[in-house]
Structures are given as structure tokens and as C-alpha cells.
Amino acid sequence: MSARPSGIRGATIAGTGMYVPDKILTNADLERMVDTSDEWIRERTGIAERRIAAPDQASSDLAVIAARNALDMAGLRAEDVHQIIVATTTPDRFLPSCACTVQAKLGARNAAAYDMFAACTGFVYGMGIARGLIGTGIADNVLVIGVETLSRIVDYTDRNTCVLFGDGAGAAVMRPCAAGEGILGVSMHSDGVLGDLLEVPAGGAASPASHATVDAREHFIRMRGKELFKVAVRGMEESLRSALDEAGLDPGELDLIIPHQANRRIIDAVCDRLGTPEHKVVINIERYGNTSSASIPISLDEVVRAGRLKFGDRVGFVAFGGGATWGATVARWTMPAMNGKPAQAVVESTVQVVK
Ligand code: ACO
């Protein structure tokens, strides 16, 4: 890719897409697998069902479908993409990266591709990085994907975790726009001291796969849910406030908040603290569970295609995840409302992209 002149310009979302697998795992199904109940799961998490990838579907397969949908909406071809950032905790393999596999399957031969390993916050981090890449002229067309096949690392004998997680993918195409439009604020944080609140103990360099690690079920997610809950609420509130500060906005000026779908009670607590009424908050956790890095781009694509975002709307994205990682972005929406129109019609009327 050739170098472009540097200088800050805006970066905006110009297309979105999502994909979830067909198979549905309901709370009733889980009642037959572990000692739990539909009532407990709904009351403590807000989840009714989640999607599970087919045995022959890996993260890259889900990601490619979401990416194609996002590229179609943006009116771009795979060859037009300059960078592919895949946020995932469940790459197909450790080597090569999931992003390189996605690049190959898409035929995005002009892109640099790499994984973003930041758990549930990965997509928000990806938006922040893409804003920097576009703003400084390093890239024009950045594909940010959040994808997970968490069912592959969930222990379906552990009721503390297996009721929470699901599989899915979401994607956004980010492109240049006029300064003062698109992404107006970014906030990114981590605290590695909190690493053991959510972990997969084995399978990496510190504890390579062995018969002993498999016997000890150390390749599955382990979570200290109660502690996570508290830091998640605090971190999400603080990071959204800090992204809003950069954008020069108050929480009350947001038209929509798209939070990471970790737990309905976490979302409610964050929005209570911000004073945000329920009708301004996107919640779909009842249908998909916690899809980690995929939850925000899935939610975004659903609201875009439902016509719930219109030109000029101010939208906040906020997440918390393992690491611990947390962050937020605030954007001024630059596409007109879709309202059931075909994606291409919307793209053609999208604000002029700055070159
Ligand atoms: N069904 C029935 N009982 C259960 C289940 C289950 N699936 N899971 C746990 N319990 C039991 C526990 O064993 C405990 O029983 P005990 O009192 O006899 O010991 C009881 O329910 C209460 O357990 P708590 O952990 O106190 O329940 P809590 O209200 O905290 O809810 C939950 C648990 C849903 C995990 C919650 O803490 C949570 O959502 N935490 C955030 C974790 C999270 O979202 N992680 C995802 C990744 S990070 C992120 O995305 C933010």
C-alpha cells in the first residue's frame, strides 16, 4: 500500500454486516445439560437463547459472511480494503492469524490483516485503531470485525459460564470523512492485574496443551463473575464518560448507546449511572447471549438495518472484557436511515467521502 500524506481527517462507519449461526441453544436445552433453570438465567443475565456454530464453521467462516455484508453496504469490493482488524478471543488457530484467514477467504489481497486480542472490548479497540489509521492517512478503507465461536472454549459442565456465551460475527467498514464527523471520541483502558477474573488457563506458551491440561479442563473459560460484574459497571461508565468528554458531549446528548451485551443487569446498571433511558439503549442479549467482541457490531448492524440510526445521530459504543480491557467510542452518524431501503441506495446518498 502506498504512503498517504499525513494529517488528521475524520473516520466514519460506512457499512455494517453481521452473521449468526442457525443453531439455537435455549435455556431449556441448558436445563438438560447442567443444574440451572430458565428462570435463573433470565433473571440474572437477561438471556433466553444463544447461537452455536456448526461443527464445520470456524470463526473465519462467520467473519467472512459479516464482512461481505458490510462491504456490500459500503459499496466496496474486497480488493479495496487496506486493513483488516479481526477482534477475537477464538481465532481459528494461533498461527496464522484469524485475520489472515479472513483475508484469504474474502480475496482482500491488498489488505494488511491482523488480530486484535482484547476479549469483549476488541471491537471498540478496533474502532479506535481504525480511527487513528484513517485520521493519519495510513489507510482509507479499514474493515473491523468482531467474531467469536465461544462455544469452542465454553465448558458445558460449568453452569457458572455455559449459560452466558454464544457465537456470532459483526463487521464495520470504516472510511475517511470530514473532520468533526464520524468518530468524535475514543477511550481505551486495560488492567492486567485483573487478568485472572476471566481466563483460559492453558493452551498458550505458559501452559502448552498436554494430556494433563486437557484432563484438568484448562482449555475452557474460567470466570469470577461477581468481581467482573462490579469492575465492568465502573469501567464502562468511566470510559463512556471519557469518550464523551473528548467529543464535547454530555451523556444526555447521546441518541443511542450500543453497549457490549455481557449481562442485562450490567447494561442496566451502566445506563442508570449515566441517566440514560431504556429506549436509547440497544439490548439484544436475550437472543444471542454474550458474544464477546461480536456483540457490539451485531447490535450495530441490527439497528442500522432497522433504520434506528439516522444522519447526525450521536451514538456511544462501550465495552468491558477479559484482560481486563474496557473502552468506548462516540460517533456522529454519517449515513441516512435505511428504513428498509436496499443498502446500495443508502450508500449512494451517504455523505461525500473525503479523499
Ligand atoms: N444456574 C443456577 N444457579 C447458578 C448458575 C446457573 N447457571 N450459575 C451460578 N449459580 C449459582 C451460584 O453457584 C451461586 O450459588 P451459591 O449461592 O449456592 O454459591 C448463586 O447462583 C449465585 O451466584 P452468583 O455468582 O452470586 O450470581 P450473580 O448474581 O453474580 O450472577 C453472573 C452470576 C450472571 C455470572 C454475574 O455475576 C455476571 O454476569 N457477571 C459478569 C460476568 C460476565 O459478564 N462475564 C462475561 C465476560 S466479561 C464481560 O463481558 C463483562
Image: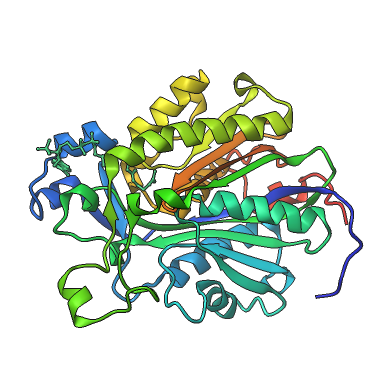
Tell me the quadrant of the picture where the C terminus can be found.
bottom right
The quadrant of the picture showing ligand 1 is top left
- In the image, taking residue 292 as reference, residue 257 lies left or right, namely right
Q: Is residue 322 visible?
A: yes
Q: Position of residue 298 (x, y in %)?
A: 48, 49
Instruction: Please tell me in which quadrant of the rendered image residue 151 appears.
Output: bottom left
- In the image, taking residue 202 as reference, residue 341 lies left or right, namely right
Q: Position of residue 12 (x, y in %)?
A: 72, 47
Tell me the quadrant of the picture where the N terminus can be found.
bottom right
- In the image, taking residue 182 as reference, residue 61 lies left or right, namely left
- Above/below status of 82 relative to 262: below
- In the image, taking residue 12 as reference, residue 221 lies left or right, namely left
- Which color scheme is applied? rainbow
Count of numbered labels shown in the rendering: 0
Q: Outermost residue toward the front?
A: 193
Q: Outermost residue toward the right?
A: 5
Q: Position of residue 90 (x, y in %)?
A: 40, 66
Residue at (61% x, 26% y) in the render? 255
Q: Is residue 314 visible?
A: no
Residue at (47% x, 62% y) in the render? 88
Q: Nearer the viewer, residue 252 or 218?
A: 218
Q: Position of residue 314 (x, y in %)?
A: 66, 31
Q: Nearer the viewer, residue 108 or 253?
A: 253
Instruction: Please tell me in which quadrant of the rendered image residue 336 appears.
Output: top right
Residue at (32% x, 65% y) in the render? 53
